[in-house]
């Protein structure tokens, strides 16, 4: 049933520097999480993607990247679904 | 004119004398009300004596022509002396020694610091975007997100959305279940 979704989430977790994955529906309900992504953050992530999509309503929803000191969260939206990929930040090039 | 007047006065006086003699000193219509000549002489004498007295009393206040020239010269010399700026003399008089200079610099800096401390400063509220970030320079010097990250994120959400849409619920049991049927 949700085996395909699980396989995609697991495949994403296998990528470099990825520490967590989250999927939520249009209402902010968490459909699946992996790693450090917490299901309680699904509502916030969904709302962020909705607000970002209001900037250019006629275009595709933009990809929002939240950066902290060690982690970055890439939020993308497609249709009613919103996904977030948690990544460990690579050291800066000097 | 004065000469003519004196002559006329003298003639009038002669006539007066004759009439005075003839009328035993009584004033007539031709007798002069004021004795011009005598009065003028008295006035002149008074003026002269007064001028002399003033000159004697205020001799110092009425300098002679030589004194005037001298005082003018002295005045000019004094003015030029006051207007001249002697640079060499200034250097010698106002030259500060190195130690005194350093001492003054210290005292002035201390006074300035005290004044700065006494001035009330208003706290400035920073309304910057990164006001809540402890070290914004570290955040800003990190590598920017690459296009690969964005593309992979888009592909990931597309695949996931497709996978969620493909979820189908297979019914293996009866939808209608008998409940408390006797």
Image (cartoon, coloured by chain):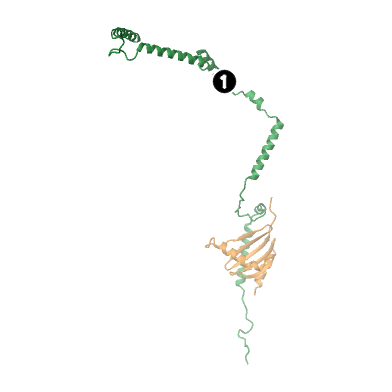
Chain colours: A orange, B green
The residue lying at 65 percent from left, 61 percent from top is: A73
The residue lying at 62 percent from left, 57 percent from top is: B147
Based on the displayed image, in which of its 4 quarters is residue B29 positioned?
Answer: top left
Query: How many residues crowd mark 1 within 10 Å: few (<14), some (14–19), many (20+)?
Result: few
Pinpoint the chain carrying mark 1: B
Asked whether residue B155 is in view, the answer is yes
Is residue B50 rendered to the left or right of residue B27? right
Pick the front one: B150 or B3: B3
Quadrant containing the N terminus of chain A is bottom right
Q: Position of residue B53 (x, y in %)?
A: 48, 14
Is residue B7 rendered to the left or right of residue A47? left
In the image, residue B105 sits, relative to residue A71, either above or below, namely above
Q: Which residue is mark 1?
A: B78
Based on the displayed image, in which of its 4 quarters is residue A51 positioned?
Answer: bottom right
The residue lying at 37 percent from left, 11 percent from top is: B38
Pick the front one: B55 or B64: B55
Pick the front one: A43 or A87: A43
Q: Position of residue B114 (x, y in %)?
A: 66, 42
In the image, residue B9 sits, relative to residue A2, either above or below, namely above
Based on the displayed image, in which of its 4 quarters is residue A6 positioned?
Answer: bottom right
Asked whether residue B157 is in view, the answer is no
Pick the front one: B10 or B112: B10
- Report the number of discs: 1
| SS for dot 1 | helix
């Amino acid at each position: 049933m949700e085996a395909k979704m699980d396989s995609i989430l697991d495949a994403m977790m296998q990528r470099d520097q990825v520490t967590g994955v989250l999927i939520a529906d249009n209402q902010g309900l968490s459909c699946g999480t992996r790693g450090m992504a917490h299901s309680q953050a699904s509502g916030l992530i969904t709302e962020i993607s909705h607000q970002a999509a209001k900037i250019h309503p006629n275009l595709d929803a933009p990809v929002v990247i939240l950066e902290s000191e060690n982690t970055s969260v890439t939020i993308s939206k497609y249709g009613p679904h919103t996904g977030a990929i948690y990544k460990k930040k690579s050291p800066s090039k000097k | 004119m004065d000469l003519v007047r004196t002559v006329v006065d003298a003639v009038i006086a002669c006539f007066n004398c004759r009439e005075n003699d003839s009328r035993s000193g009584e004033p007539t219509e031709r007798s002069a009300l004021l004795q011009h000549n005598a009065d003028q002489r008295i006035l002149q004498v008074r003026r002269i004596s007064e001028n002399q007295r003033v000159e004697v009393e205020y001799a110092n206040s009425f300098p002679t022509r030589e004194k005037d020239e001298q005082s003018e010269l002295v005045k000019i010399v004094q003015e030029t002396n006051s207007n001249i700026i002697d640079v060499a003399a200034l250097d010698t008089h106002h030259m500060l020694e190195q130690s005194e200079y350093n001492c003054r610099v210290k005292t002035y800096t201390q006074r300035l610091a005290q004044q700065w401390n006494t001035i009330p400063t208003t706290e400035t509220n920073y309304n910057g975007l990164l006001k809540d970030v402890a070290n914004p320079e570290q955040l800003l010097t990190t590598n920017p997100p690459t296009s690969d990250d964005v593309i992979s994120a888009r592909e990931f959400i597309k695949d996931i959305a497709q996978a969620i849409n493909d979820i189908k619920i297979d019914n293996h049991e009866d939808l209608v279940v008998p409940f408390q049927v006797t």
